[in-house]
Structures are given as structure tokens and as C-alpha cells.
Amino acid sequence: NVLKHTYIGDDQQRRAAEAAIKKYERMQGYPGTLLQIVVMDRFPFPVRQSATILLKNMVVRHWTVKKKLHENSIVIGEKDRGVIKRNLLEAIVTQSRQQIRVQLLECLHQVCRTDFPKNYPFLLKEIMKNIHSKKPQRIYGALCALRQVFKNYHFRAEKDRRYLPTLVESTFPTLIQIITAVLKSKLNQDSYEMVRMLIKIFRIATYLSMPDYLKNPANLGPWMQALVKVVESPIVGVSNIPSDRKELTSIP
């Protein structure tokens, strides 16, 4: 009922709901409860979406806070952190609602900024397990999650990108297999989105410098062939391609 009143009802009900939520934020188990609501289909979509936004806001604002700095500080306890890290990826790869998935991915990005890889050592293994699952929804969700891991190194200084070569070597042999296999067939909306996510990962990995793995022509060549094939492929879902540059930017 509290979550329900955050998006419906009069101003008085909303203010009462928001005040109640502020109290819950300080309670152990609150973040895990929000995540549990998000993944349970028996709750209406607006309730699940509200829970996702509250969880994302809490993680973004308080994940880096490890101890109380003042009386009003909110600290996410170690038990709650463990619950989130153990269950967040599964929530992402099983989520069919894009509006909810994008909020969960923002949670993952924030967690990775401070915890990956040292304090989140099992994440990459779980992501790759889902990429190998042969289930399209899990594969796509796992690729979205992997992009968040790579984004952790996007604009970092060289000294903070030391794990990137290991990350590339651990994932790119599988990623090139996926994009090569997908491009063998005519792209549809789903396969196009998967290819787009793979290209985003490739772009982040090569944004500031070329990883040693890709300096080997045998590893870089297939990626270049795949990119050329993507450029030559028709744009999915667009019958009349606009000639105006500004209009073209509206096409993902």
C-alpha cells in the first residue's frame, strides 16, 4: 500500500507514503525487500516500477557510504549488500520490462564502481554463465549487465583500468562468437538489439586504447568483419531512411 500511494492518491497520501519510506530506508532488509517486490509478477507493474526506482535511488545515494558520517546518514549494511549482489543479476536477466531493467542496470553500475572485481568476484562468472545459457532473454540481459561492468572503465585513467585487459580476454572470445552467429541470419528487432549491445561493449573496450588481446590481428579481424557486415545490413524497423543527418540521429 505504501508503494501504491507513491504514484496514486492525493497529495496527503503521497506525502504520508514518502514519510513512511524514509523510515524504512534505515531498516535492515529494506533494499532486499524492494528487490524482491521488483521480481514478483504478482505485484502490479506500477508497484514494481516504484520499488525499482526507490532501490536505484538508494543504491546511487548510499552504496559508497560505509559508515555513518552524521546522525542522518543512511548506511546499507553488509548483509543487505550481500543480498543485492547475490540477486541483482538474476533480476536483470529475467526481467522482460525494459523500464524496470534499465533501473536495475543502473544499480549494477553503481555497485560495480566500488565493488568490482575485488568485492564482487563472482559477478563475471555469473554473467558468462547466462551468456552461455542459449536463452535469448538471459543472453541479452547478461550482455546489458556486462556493458555496465565495462562502463566502469570507460573514462578511467590508465592506472585505474588495469583489470580491463583481463576483462577483455575473459569475454571477447565468446562475444565474437555471438555476434558472428547472429549476423549469419537477417536481423530482426531482437537480434538487432543484441548486436547493438555487443558493439557498445566493443566501443567501450577500445575507447581510450586498444587492449593487447585485440592487437592480435587474429582477434581483431573477426570484429572488423562483423562491424562491416553491420554497416552493410538494412536498418531494422525503418522503411524510409531519412536523408537529413538530424533525423538519422533519432534512429538507434
Image (cartoon, rainbow, N blue to C red):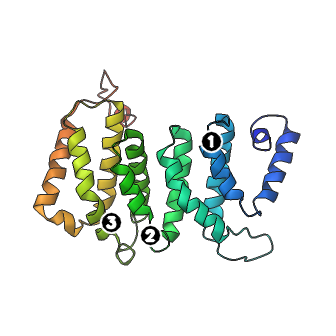
Secondary structure found at label 1: loop
Image x and y of residue 99, in percent? 55, 40
Q: Is residue 8 shown left or right of residue 211? A: right
Image x and y of residue 164, in percent? 33, 68
Q: Is residue 178 shown left or right of residue 90? A: left
> Looking at the image, can residue 152 be seen?
yes
> Looking at the image, can residue 151 be seen?
no
Image height check: is 168 above or below 179? below
Q: Which mark is residue 121?
A: 2
The extreme top residue here reads: 239
Secondary structure found at label 3: helix
Q: Is residue 170 shown left or right of residue 150? A: left
Could you say which is closer to the camera, residue 125 or residue 213? Answer: 125
Residue with the mark numbered 1: 40
Q: CA distance from mark 1 to mark 3?
A: 32 Å
N-terminal of the two: label 2 or label 3? 2
